[in-house]
Amino acid sequence: MYAPTCLLYALVISMWVDKAPGQACDTFTDLDLHHAIVGTEVNVRLLLYSRADPECGRLLLHSAAPPAMNLSLPTTFIIHGFRPTGSPPVWLLPMAELVLEREDRNVVVVDWNYGAANIDYFRSVRNSKDTATNLTAFIRTMQEHGASLDSIHMIGISLGAHISGFVGADLNGSIGRITGLDAAGPMFAGKLPEYRLDRTDAQFVDVIHTDIDALGLREPLGHIDFYPNGGADQLGCPKTILKGVAYFKCDHQRSTFLFMESLNKTCEIRAFPCTTYDDFLDARCTDCTQFGAQGCPIFGYDVVKWKDTLLRLGQTKSFFNTNGAKPYCRTNYRFDVLTWNQEVQWGYITIKLYGKNQSAKATIDHKRLKFEKYTETQLLAQFDGVVETVEKMSVTYSSAIVLGPKHKLRVLQLRLQRIEGSTSLSRSLCRYDLLLKEKEEVTFRPIPCVDSNF
């Protein structure tokens, strides 16, 4: 990718010093719109956070003294992206704290706000390459003091994802892991791998795409690429420009909040390897046996547990859907319907589950479903909550036809199977001989299925 140049010597290389007693904590550079308009020069500042003082950033300064960092610990670098207004990212320090809660390690926040705060995006792109040169030199110095490149994890957001890639390429792909959170698309779409983040930039590269139709990249970049909600429009984000700046940044920024949820383990999001998003929605990708007892990969921080299998597969696209707000995770079921209408029926299905003090809802409406006589229709039902023990459920059918008579769906058998781990749960819930009248909710108690090979 980007080779070190003489610019290295013009850049500020921030490195390690011990914090003197009483020394104030350092903070991320806070700029404003004025800085973004007049432009700023590259000035990379590295802030070290540790478990000993997780809320206090220690500025790492260049020094010939032995490093204050505990280089026997692994190190995580968190690298922000384009900052058109110069304000500090709201998610930055919370993410650093969550990493420290998960593991005892050095967390280094890469503050390149002086290079990122610019209304000229193309200038920030150029500055991102200079930032990568700076960071490469820093990591080489770490290595000289005994740090292992295997133990380095770089988490890059937007332009920060490509900075991680540039650094990784300069180090010959020897760092342990790069996580790209919605890698920036403008100026990088369609580029050769050496000009953007690529799976050869680290021993393991995982990427999440949340804004592929605007600020992010559509093409897969890593060993595994996650596409929540198809990778474009994220639930809960504004649909019109009337919502102001949130309309432009919500989808793009959702990648950081999804990753942070994987860090705090509020809930686990299982992703399903699939060729296309439509195939995923049509429940054609629920077989996870290729991953063995672990099942399909869990999205986010812990996906590294699937590293060996993913490296063997080469490149994997995975999909999952989310809720529009925290908790983002959904509960996945396979829902099979066997009908006996004389004529073909079309429509949508809504399912609700009820348990002790719990309820959850799934609406299957990504397309009009086709129901044929004596033909099984297999659906993916993703519920917005968890019901540990299903005591009753309801089903609503709608043909979505405004004019004309109301339709009915005559059902021989409904079958509900939770997808968990490498296979669905062996125990399935069924209902037999059911009449679904259009837009009328039918509630019933499901029973264990008689035939497990439905």
Image (tube, rainbow, N blue to C red):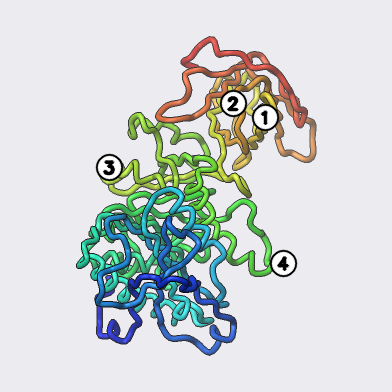
Of label 2 and label 4, which has the lower sequence position? 4
The quarter of the picture where the N terminus appears is: bottom left
Q: Is residue 373 left or right of residue 392?
A: left
User: Dot 4, crowdedness within 10 Å: few (<14), some or many (≥20)?
Assistant: few
The residue singled out by tag 3 in the image is 308
Of label 4 and label 1, which has the lower sequence position? 4
**Alpha-carbon distance for marks 1 and 3?**
37 Å
Rendered residue at 54%/85% (across/down): 35
User: Dot 1, crowdedness within 10 Å: few (<14), some or many (≥20)?
Assistant: some
The residue singled out by tag 4 in the image is 242
Report if the CB atoms under discs 1 and 2 are less than 8 Å apart: yes
Q: Nearer the viewer, residue 305 or 55?
A: 55
The residue singled out by tag 1 in the image is 358
The residue singled out by tag 2 in the image is 388
Say which mark, if any, is on residue 11.
none
Q: Residue furthest top?
A: 450
Q: Is residue 231 above or below residue 369?
A: below
User: Dot 2, crowdedness within 10 Å: few (<14), some or many (≥20)?
Assistant: few
**Alpha-carbon distance for marks 3 and 2?**
32 Å
